[in-house]
Each structure stands twice: as structure tokens, then as C-alpha cells.
Image (tube, rainbow, N blue to C red):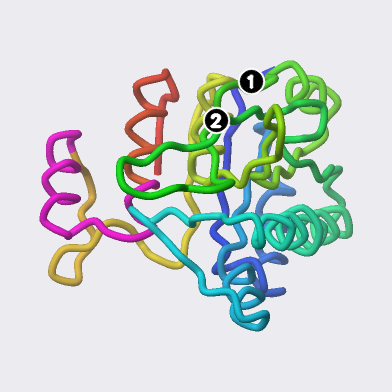
Amino acid sequence: MPAPIVIKISGHELDSPDFLAELAATLKHFDTPVVIVHGGGKEITALQTRLGIEPRYVDGLRITDAESLALVEMVLCGTVNKRIVRTLVNAGIDAVGLSGVDGGLVSADKMTHESVDMGYTGEVTAVRVDVLIDFLDQGVTPVIAPICLGEDSNFNVNADHVAGAVAAALEAEKLVFVSNVEGVLKDGAVIPQLTPNQVGEMIADGTIFGGMIPKVKTALEALAEGVQHRQ
């Protein structure tokens, strides 16, 4: 089996039928095995707001309190995941929807932060790569929601982090982030290439901020772990 491509899809795109149809049409012509990891932050935030729960973030990461965990599981593992899988299957792609909990696919521990209790927000500790390889060997496209297995609870893990861990575990050919933002911007223009030192400087001066922080950090970690390309 050739090295797969891991595609992380931002939650900003996932409520658009046109985007999902275009994604399915593109993937149908791929010769390379694909694993999809998806977010869902836009719909999580909308539901939190509707229920009177204030969304909270630190360093671009959602803080998941106990009240929000069930809501996040419902949106990611249910609504969003099955919408993607339905679109792919109806386009003729053999796809299966999973979370990190299924088969112990992605394990996590509670994320620690120097100044904030991250609640049920986690960080990846292990990936069962054999589960993914079994699906890929059968020509099945795994679609992964980033709810991960903990010892005493499930954890909500940032989808960028899950995608990076999955790409590293699979020794993927490429890790691709699909987002509503073109890339790291400076003076309105996309910066085509960054070094690790530049990333640190741009986070410090605020050029890289919010949800772009976990993306660029994950990209660097994935490259360090042997993923050949990130875009």
C-alpha cells in the first residue's frame, strides 16, 4: 500500500453541501489512500451559544468543561461525522465514520496548561495504526471525529492535533489542512514558507494567532515525526 494522505477538514467548511460534494468528487479520483480527520468548531460554538454556554478558548484551543463534553461528542461523532460519511458514500467512496474511541483508535490524556484548567480537552498519547491500515488495505476511507479515548473519560482533542498524530503514525506522504483561511497571513498576503524559528516569533508577536496556532505547531511536529509534506 502506498503511503496515505491525511486530510484535516476545518469545521468552517463542513456545513456546506457544495464543499462536501466537491471534496467527494475530488477524492473519488485519488489513487492514494486517504484518511480524513475533521473538526466541527463552528457548529459546536453555535450549539453552545444556543444553550447559553459561553465558548472558551486558550491559545486557539477550546476549553471543554463537563457540561460541554456531551454536546461536543454529539456534534462531532454524530451530526458532522455522519454528514461527511453520507456524502462520500453517496458519491461512490467506501467510507466509514469513526471517533478516536472506536477500537481505541486514538488515546488521550487531559491537556495541561500553566494557567487554565483545560477540563475535558485532551492531548494524544497513542494511535492504533493497525486499525487504520486494515481499513486502508480494504480500500475504505476512515473519517475520524477527534473525540479520543481516556482512562476515566473521553476527551475532546483539537482536530489538528489528531490529524498530525495520525499522519505521523501512518508515516503519511502528506498532511493537508483544509481551512477557510488560506494560510499564515502577513499584511494580507499568504506567507508561502516558514521555518520553526519564524513560527515561534510570529506566535509571540501575534501574527499567528487563534486557530492557526495549533495548525502550524502540528505541521512542525508532523514534519519532525517523518511526514514528508505539509500544506
Query: In x, y percent, where is residue 147?
Result: 68, 44
Q: State the residue at coordinates (51%, 35%).
A: 123
Query: In x, y percent, where is residue 148?
Result: 67, 37
Mark 1, secondary structure of its residue = loop
User: Could you tell which of marks 1 and 2 lies nearer the N-terminus?
Assistant: 1
Q: State the residue at coordinates (54%, 59%).
A: 10
Q: State the residue at coordinates (13%, 42%).
A: 198
Query: Which quadrant holds the N terminus?
Result: top right
What kind of residue is marked 1? Answer: Pro
Query: Taking 144 as reference, is 156 left or right?
Result: left
Q: Which residues are magenta?
A: 195-214
Quarter of the image for residue 34 reads top right
Q: Which residue is mark 1?
A: 2
Q: Which residue is mark 2?
A: 124
Query: In x, y percent, where is residue 133?
Result: 74, 20
Of badges 1 and 2, the one in the foreground is 2
Q: Is residue 166 magenta?
A: no
Mark 2, secondary structure of its residue = strand
Picture layout, residue 162 above or below residue 84: above
Q: How many marks?
A: 2
Using the image as rendered, state which of residue 206 and residue 24 is in the foreground.
Answer: 206
